Structure formats: C-alpha cells, structure tokens
Amino acid sequence: MQPTGHLRGDAVRVGGDARQRFYDARGYGRPLDGNEIALSRVEAAHLLFRGDLSGIELGGDAAGVSGGDPVGFERFFVASAAAADRFAVRFLVYSDLRDRGFYLSPAREPWPGGSDAPGDAVDFVAYERGETPDTGKVKYPIRVVGERESVAAAGLAGRTLAVVDEESDITYFAAEGGAVDGATDYEPPADLSGVLLADRVVVWDAPEGLYERGFYGRPLTGRAADVEGALQLSLVEAASLVADGRLALSTSVGDEGGVAGDDAARIVARGREVEGDRFDRRLAVYERLRGADAVPKTGFKFGADFRTYLDVETVEDLPHSEHLVRVVEADHRFSPRELSLDVRLAGGVRKEMVFAVTSVGGGRGARAADWVRAADVEWVSVDRLTP
C-alpha cells in the first residue's frame, strides 16, 4: 500500500516511513519531525505520476483537518497548475531530469540546496549524478522557461536554462560568465592620420603592420589600383584608436556645420548618427576586447556585432575566429527563440556564442576615452547542453 499525501499550504506532507522511502533513498522533499517529509507540488506530482503515492488530499488546513478524499494525478496536476506559477513546464523539466538520473530540489529555502541557488531566477538545483541533497554538490542551477517567455540578460551567467517549447520538448542551455581573453601581441603606432567619411575613416598612408599584424580595417585595393597603403577603418575601430591617442583626423567630411569637441567626439557623433546609442555600447565592447589582446572584427555575416580572433600573428596566417559576440543592453530580455537562433548559428560555424551585456553611462558629456572605459560589461557565453 502506497502512502497518501496531504496538501498543507504549498507543500504536501507525507508520513509513515516517508523519510526513509523518499528522502533518504531517493532525494525527494525535506525532513520534518520524525519520519514525516514535506514535498513541493512538483515533487509530489512526480511521485503521484509514478504511482509511489496512492493519492493526495487537497484543501487540508494547518491543524491537520482533512480536505476530503485523496485525488489522483490528473486532479492534482490541474489544481497545482491553477495554483502555482509555470507548474506544467516545471513538472516536465523535473520529470525529464529525474529520468536522466539526477536528484533535484526546489531552489528555495528551506529545501535542501536552496541556499546554493544563484539568486531568485532559479527553479531547481540538480545535484551531481549519484549524489543526494544531504551531501551532493549542485551540478546545474535550473531556470525553467516556456517558449513564449523572456529571460533577463543581466545575471544570466551561472544558470542552466531549460526551455520547454509548445510541443513539450525541452532544450537545455548552459550560460557561463568570464571575459574573452586573447594573446595578440601588437601595439598600433601613435602617429596615424585619417579622414572621416560618412560611416568610416580612411588612413591613406597606413603602416603595413596596422592591417597585417593588428588586423585593423581593410585595405583599399583593386586589380588596377595605383594607390598603396590606404586602409579603411570602421567607425568603432577609428573611435578606439582615437580614444587611445593613436589616430588623429586630418579632415571630417560631412560635419562642416560644426561638431563640437575633439576628434573622438566627432567620430562618436558620427557613429550615433548612423546607428544611435547602440554605437556607444559596441564601442565599449570593442575597447574591452582590444584591451584583452583579442581582435574583434565585424560579425555582420553571422548576424552578430563582432567575431573575435584570440591570437593573430599575421593576416596571412589568420586562424579561425573563436567567438561570435552580440552586444545587448543591460535591461535586455531574450526570447528563447532568439537565444536558440544565436546559439545554433554559432555552433554551426564552430564558434562560441558570447553576449556582452553592456551599460554605458555619462557618455554624452564626457571624453570618449573616459566613458568607454567606465562602461559596465558582463560577458555571458551560452551553449547547448545535454545533461
């Protein structure tokens, strides 16, 4: 005879030998007095689904007054879906991970593992296989997300996303923090001179190493070209070089009306003209990547802001780029479809998908070199995961 559970508030209590049967042996619930345990609604539904509980009494009070005849899985599932947020998708993920051999706990106090959850945006903690809630190390902090929900970009690092689509299939994503670090050893010269055009800067007499070793810009070439040393820089490349004191503008085409400020202010103003405040965030991320000895180049062909090369010696012997970097605002919220598209594309071209969650403050009234370096950038790499 299987035991019966009793719903008390938002937990299901089970007596008899429940502690030995469910908690000690299989990691369900949390101990109460004696041999009684408390189960979360999802845990209780899973045991009911498996036939390990004979039923659950609904509507009982704290004094233990019965709530009527015990109900089976169907009625308990429907009642819990009405009472608890995202119950149906959380049940699907809980059941899937249990079937994969993981013990799980609700990621809240006073359940085991609740204190190990990184913040409130976690539904379960899954322990290392073979480990119990008493002694186990948390393997995955699980955030359950429906296909049509959204996920905050800020604070995403350190979580495992379990996305449940409309057909109840589950896709897992691992989000990890950590900066992008390179090993490119190149120092640009400090006497570059360029012309600011509509959306780029041309350096007419660029030294060969600027492109060949630093992988800045793109040479202005052609089959019948009679011009040597001309290099086209993107606005973010030029703004970075100006902010670092490496590049000065000899001419600015298109701002004859007068753009106040130094050369950096002129380039930043032009960048904002062509792409709005997004330019500020991209410039801040570009500076961080260059400062970490990585080489960022446009990621346009991949639908990203940048692709990165970590160790460039010469362009003639250029390695494959390692990352796709997409710059997002600090308050950005991903749709699961958006994440899936980005991660799938990056994986398809053998790159790691990295999101630069960026907040730029005080840029309008300060020197570019100051506000760019003061920007707050959180790096989050996201990849598909098979638990």
Image (cartoon, rainbow, N blue to C red):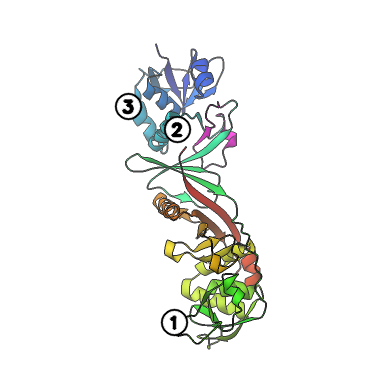
Label 1, secondary structure: give it: loop
Nearer the viewer's eye, disc 2 or disc 3?
2
Write down the region rendered in magenta: 111-133
In the picture, the disc for residue 74 is: 3
Residue 17: in magenta span: no
Q: CA distance from mark 1 to mark 2?
A: 60 Å
In the picture, the disc for residue 97 is: 2
Quick one: 14 or 65, which is closer to the camera? 14
Badge 1 amino acid: Arg
Residue 282 rendering spot, x and y as whole percentages: 53, 66
Residue 41 lies in quadrant: top left
Badge 3 amino acid: Glu
Q: CA distance from mark 2 to mark 3?
A: 21 Å
Mark 1 residue crowding within 10 angstroms, few (<14) / some (14–19) / many (20+) = few
Is residue 46 positioned above or below 172 on the image? above
The residue sitting at 59% across, 77% down in the picture is 208
Residue 366 lies in quadrant: bottom right
Label 2, secondary structure: give it: helix
Q: Main secondary structure of the magenta part?
A: loop
Is residue 74 positioned above or below 159 on the image? above
